[in-house]
Amino acid sequence: MTGKGAEELAPAGATVAGGQVAGEILTGDVLAGAAREAPGEQDASRADSRTKNNRAWFLVLPVVVSVAFTAVIPLMTVVNFSVQDIFSPTDRIFVGLDWFRSVTRDPEIRAALLRTLLFSAQVLLLEIPLGVALAVSMPRRGAGVSVALVLVALPLLIPWNVVGTIWQIFARGDIGLGGWTINNVLGVNFNYTLDSTDAWITVLLMDVWHWTPLVALLAYAGLRSIPEPYFQAAQIDGASAWATFRHIQLPRLRGVLTIAILLRFMDSFMIYTEPFVVTGGGPGNATSFLSILLSKIAVGQFDLGPAGAFSLLYFLIVQIVSYVFFTVLTRTGR
Amino acid sequence: MADIRLEGVSHSYDGGRTWALKPMTWTWRSNRAYALLGPSGCGKTTLLNIISGLISPTTGRIWLGDREVTSVPTAGRNIAQVFQFPVLYEQMSVYDNLAFPLRNRGYPRAEVDRRVRTVSQLLGLDGHLGRRSRRLDPGRQQIVCLGRGLVRPDVAAVLLDEPLTVIDPALKWTLRSKLKEIHRDTGHTLVYVTHDQTEALTFADEVVVLKDGEIVQAGEPTELFLAPAHEFVGHFIGSPGMNVVPAEITGGVVRVGGAVVGRAAGDGGDLPPGPVRIGVRPEFVRIVPGRDAPGWGGPETDTAGRDAPGWDGPGRDAGARAAPGLQARITGVDRMGSYHLVHARVDGHTLVSKTGPGSRHEPGAVAFFRFDPGRAFLFRDEVRCGSLAPLGGSLEQPLEGPLEGARGRSPEGRQGA
């Protein structure tokens, strides 16, 4: 009886699948119930005519329109540029995927890509552990909470180019407090305008200073959301501070750290303003990240075709890496 | 195994302005199962956390056997605690969860393994040891939490803070009997916090009722049911709760709105005259046929007379004729299946009587409500000060019958609630 019902159901794939899913979760009764409904759905033609009314899709229209204006249309402009060689507004040639080929083969762009990936990796490796450590050591209750929050959040309130300016001056060997201290007190020769390693370190430190607070705030919010009994249980079980962190706090930070890693990856991979202010991409190409190179091509040289192709690839890389991060982070430890 | 003794222990969360727990001296005797019962916010969890050392009391001292532990941190006390919801190390397997408290204390590997396997066998977790703890159902998760407490060799007491709150009702019964079983097998002192009287009464050797940070009564479940020492106990335990009727003592006699209901027998000598409240459980309120009332008779006699057999028991009629009781108008009857609740108004107050399912009282009728002697108590400032005794010798002893009956019935009534 049930078997026959299931056979009848077979064409209505969705219903069968639903029944199976429910059957797994609940009991066989649900499946049997679905099978019992089968005779009612024998009139397939009527069921079809009912599903053909798709006017509900119009409800999605506002979203489609707004997304079109905010994303699709600007993006299509770039796509349009990327497949043409534009000499003047009236003089343009369709070149297909030539620009994409040349962009992917350009050694300067490849070097910038590697440089940016390395920068992002270092940013994540430094900022995530540092942010978590900061969050763990922030007070959980009392008057210290607001003081700590304000102090930690302060760098986040400073505009990008101001951050750049601050560090540009701070790291100078002659008048900057930081640079002067390193040169004259520590006795290490430090000059970010001449030495590429020094420039790299300056930009990296600047990003860590600017954005670790974001990770710390996210992690702090995550820590605060852990119910008190977890800590009490850890006390009763005699867990050390490290064991408490390792087995209670860290696992429960997975969600916010996923967000933090995604945000910090995207931001650092697209970093532009601060290194532009501090080093302008130099010395040489030492801090010439993808965004700086892109703006040079698009705005400086006004090569719209290569810049379009470059932008699209850039966009694609950010998308793919973010997707990979997100998938890995949400799937593991399940 | 050792007694846990609290000496003048109290706690205030706001530096002494209000007291979550008023100074109390109390001993949790070893190997017994206690239920700590009380409404939300009465200090149950505070008391538990003080015992386990999660908070230190504002005043007082705590003894574990003959060792003072007032300032000993949680990890140093041999107390296990299970919380309202399953608190697990979610990414660990069940085995690792159970082993965690032992590993933290540096037990050798073989010993850890032996103990974990013993406990998992005791709790029926053998088949789940390799599973990730978060994949278990909430009931099993709570059992794992309990196991984390039991796995330690030196545990003196297991504190359970409303452990079945998040558990599916159907599973609650199984878990509760599992707990009882474990208590029987291990002999740990159990302190079980709950605000569910059924849970408390079925589970515990002794019930401790806490209200506003004070222990208002402690005793065996039957004692709390039959002889509440505080109005709150009467309300909180039993379903429906105890009737409370304001009355007046004049010259050693208790009157409700002018009608004499009995003699005041003070717990510690004679009671001074003045207002008093009579507390009596619906189980011990008898409805006496209206024919005994002057000016009443007719149809009421028949209907009221029919509920007598098999329920109110022998002796009821004899007592009834001797003392008609309080005249009251029946305002409603709830048919609850295995029993009926007859609501009435007397002197502006409601009175509920629990009668047999066969009783046929009609709303609007006037009947006499009489209290079983020795089961009606007098309260002043919510605290019991005496009991209601029959008027000088007009009632004799034949009331043992209905009383026994009432006692036998009471658990059934509670479970039905």
Image (cartoon, rainbow, N blue to C red):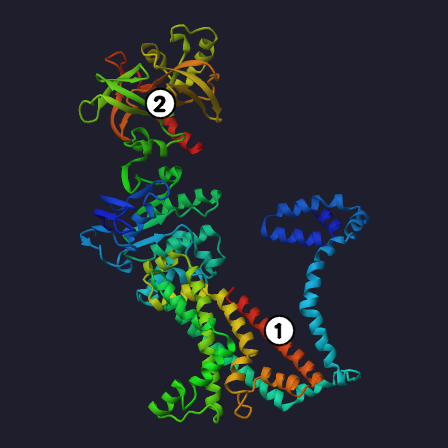
Q: What kind of element bears circle 2?
A: helix
Q: Chain of mark 2?
A: B
Q: Nearer the viewer, residue A87 or B231?
A: A87
The percent position of residue A93, horizontal first and vertical second, equals 79, 85
In this view, B32 is above or below A109? above
The percent position of residue A270, horizontal first and vertical second, equals 57, 78
The percent position of residue A262, horizontal first and vertical second, equals 54, 71
Residue annotated with mark 2: B284
Mark 1 belongs to which amino acid? Gln
Is A161 on the left or on the right of B400, as rendered?
A: right
Q: Nearer the viewer, residue B22 or B181?
A: B22
Residue B184 visible (yes or no): no
In this view, A281 is above or below B200? below
Q: Nearer the viewer, residue B307 or A160?
A: A160
Q: Residue at x 44, y 85 (%)?
A: A169
Image quadrant where residue A228 sits? bottom left
Is B270 on the left or on the right of A188, as rendered?
A: left
Badge 1 local density, few (<14 within 10 Å), some, or many (20+)? Answer: few
Residue annotated with mark 1: A319
Q: What kind of element bears circle 1?
A: helix
Q: Chain of mark 1?
A: A
The percent position of residue A281, horizontal first and vertical second, equals 55, 87
In this view, B238 is above or below A233? above
Q: Nearer the viewer, residue A290 or A1?
A: A290
